Image (tube, rainbow, N blue to C red):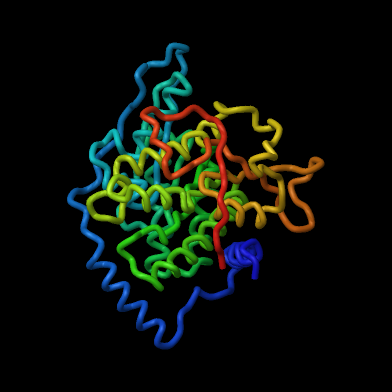
Amino acid sequence: MSRASRARRIATKAAFGGGGAVGVAGGAAGVLWAQALLARRRVGLPDREPFPVDGTYGTHRRSSAGLPPYRLAVLGDSAAAGLGADHPEDTMSVLLAEGLSAVSGRPVQLANRAVVGAQTSAVDAQVDLALTAFSGHGPDAAVIMVGANDVTHRVPARASLRALDQVVRRLVEADCDVIVACCPDLGTVQPVPNPLRALGRRWSRTLAAGQAITTVEAGGRAVSLGTLLGPEFEHRGDEFFSADRFHPSSVGYRRVAEVLLPSLCAALGLGPDPDESLDLRRGEQVAPIAKVAARAAAEPGSEVSRAQVAGADRGTQGRWAVLRHRIPLIRPETSVATEPPEPTDLDPQPVHQE
């Protein structure tokens, strides 16, 4: 079964019920269970709790144009919370807030409601807090990073995607732009041995493709993390992993923020015109959403959002979606920028998917 077909099937079952979890039978299950115990011993424990980061960010603190601050909520798991960063300003959420302020010229009020260990089912409670986090007002935009704990706890994909659908729809209905950072490739976690690591890679990529479909159907934008950190982690692992050998380091979080910031800006109307022509040389395209989501899972940093063809939202194969590359080509030797980038373009690489 192709990656696109599997992604479409999982997302459809999440919406309408049915289907089962990805399973492993017989002796293989025992091997994986033993490897999971070994992996937990190999992966260190975080030496600190996430930093408190709520506040107003931006060099201006007051808009020169007299415009109000943007209200930004960050939701999800330990990565969204910034666990593993060396300083508060190194967390993904603060980097996004500072970057958004630099691009817009307006201050940014940040509310981070992410919880360490959260699965997708727990994010709905975070939405409750986010919708009243800004003196009773909801956020202008929300960035969600979640899914890794669903994979490690073997949550059925349909249950994970149903929970994500509810979260995105609630925020969209509250007039909030939503950017979902899809589940990263867990095959990049070196302390986890094979075959567990190979299965983690396959499951996480399958979930990421389903997350992209679910997010776009619900009205948000999906950004692929995929193997984004993989090549750099393999070449510069000590630099990109934190001391626990599982969560990103400050440098790793900067790379993630570099990928998400252009899509966040575009969602708020700060990037290029949404109807701009596609860069066909870089593989940007409009296609049925399942095909686009499968490609995005294989192309780290790519963005998936809604599109129309001849004025229609849907074709015979489902909703139309557009795949865009908003950041420069990612290479293992690429140095990490010291300032958040302005919205530009990005790039791909193929991947195996169930």
Quarter of the picture holding the N terminus: bottom right
Classify residue 152 as left or right of residue 7. Answer: left
What x and y, as percent, mark residue 131? 43, 41
Q: Position of residue 44 (x, y in %)?
A: 22, 59
- Quadrant location of residue 186? bottom left
Measured as percent of width and height from the top left, residue 224 is found at 52, 49
Q: In the picture provided, is 37 more to the left or to the right than 121?
A: left
Rendered residue at 40%/42% (across/down): 74
**Which residue: 36% across, 33% down?**
95
Q: How many marks?
A: 0
Q: Residue furthest bottom?
A: 26
- Image quarter where the C terminus lies is bottom right
> Which corner quadrant of the image does residue 219 belong to?
top right
Q: What's the residue at 25%, 45% (across, down)?
A: 50
What residue lies at 47% left-to-right and 39% top-to-bottom? Answer: 260
Residue 54 lies, with reference to residue 106, above or below; the image says: below
Of residues 71 and 241, the one nearer the viewer is 241
